[in-house]
């Protein structure tokens, strides 16, 4: 029996959250740095993504598939992607920590943040972990005061104030 | 990073499998792959997402 992953409707959004983890795959020899860089450039410049991202980020795409099916969807859309990376991802990482306590949890998690200062292709962002200088290439139109989601050393996307609250409300009904 | 853990299936009852992760046993959801006892599987957040190697 083979796991059938659902298609990813919004590959760009998926990659905004998945690419920050990519260096881990490169370090493990599972992904070539040139491929990661190409995906990074595609997202940063709004280019079409023609790579099989489902196979590159297998765990995330399969978990998004499971979540999509639980939500009664036939594809991985933006609601599924945000719910996975912003809400379910944290649960998944904590689950892994129970079995493998040696894994560093904090680095993997997606955190909300507020932009304090823009500095060319970087931005200083206040997150629950403190202030950090993060890569700004996926969000070139960012302004001071914007709310963002962060993953590793990246700003994944700008988030609207009511967005996460809306998801949390929906999530509690699931 | 969304890294899954590899464990060994001890038994399967319906859609639930008991998986051993080097001595730590967990009941996990097996409905997407339906493994057999003895299979090595990749598990993430209590879901089996890949069969690593069948016995």
Image: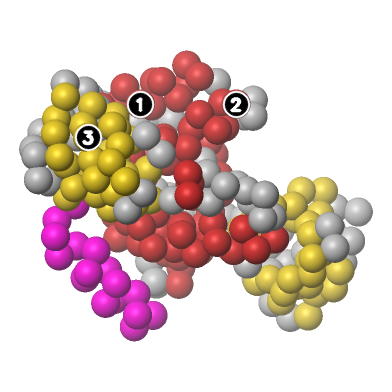
Q: Are marks 3 and 1 on the same chain?
A: yes
Q: Earlier in the sequence, mark 3 or mark 1?
A: 1
Query: Which one is in front, A95 or A6?
Result: A95
In front of the other: label 2 or label 1? 2
Identify the residue at image location x=65%, y=71%: B29
State which chain disc 2 sits on: A
Point out residue A54 in the picture as x, y percentages from the top left corner: 49, 42
Q: CA distance from mark 2 to mark 3?
A: 26 Å
The residue beneath circle 1 is: A40
Please identify the dominant SS of the magenta region. Answer: helix
The residue beneath circle 2 is: A27
Q: Is residue A44 above or below residue B9?
A: above
Most extreme residue toward the top is A34
Point out residue A21 in the picture as x, y percentages from the top left corner: 47, 37
Specify start and end residues of the magenta stretch as a single range: A159-174
In the visual, does B50 lie left or right of A151? right
Identify the residue at image location x=49%, y=64%: A91
Point out residue A57 in the picture as x, y percentages from the top left corner: 51, 41
State which chain disc 3 sits on: A
Q: Earlier in the sequence, mark 2 or mark 1?
A: 2
Q: Secondary structure at mark 1?
A: helix
């Amino acid at each position: 029996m083979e796991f059938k992953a659902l298609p990813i409707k919004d590959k760009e959004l998926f990659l905004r959250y998945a690419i920050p983890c990519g260096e881990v795959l490169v370090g493990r020899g599972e992904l070539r740095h040139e491929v990661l860089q190409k995906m990074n450039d595609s997202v940063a410049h709004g280019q079409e993504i023609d790579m099989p991202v489902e196979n590159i980020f297998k765990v995330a795409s399969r978990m998004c598939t499971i979540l999509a099916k639980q939500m009664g969807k036939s594809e991985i859309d933006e609601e599924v992607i945000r719910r996975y990376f912003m809400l379910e991802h944290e649960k998944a990482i904590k689950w892994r920590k129970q079995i493998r306590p040696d894994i560093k949890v904090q680095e993997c998690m997606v955190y909300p943040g507020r932009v304090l200062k823009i500095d060319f292709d970087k931005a200083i962002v206040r997150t629950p972990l403190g202030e950090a200088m993060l890569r700004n290439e996926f969000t070139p139109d960012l302004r001071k005061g914007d709310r963002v989601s962060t993953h590793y050393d990246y700003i994944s996307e700008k988030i609207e104030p009511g967005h996460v609250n809306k998801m949390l409300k929906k999530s509690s009904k699931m | 990073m969304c890294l899954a853990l590899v464990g060994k299936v001890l038994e399967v009852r319906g859609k639930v499998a008991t998986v051993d992760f080097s001595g730590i046993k967990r009941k996990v959801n097996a409905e997407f792959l339906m493994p057999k006892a003895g299979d090595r599987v990749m598990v993430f957040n209590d879901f089996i997402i890949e069969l690593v190697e069948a016995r």
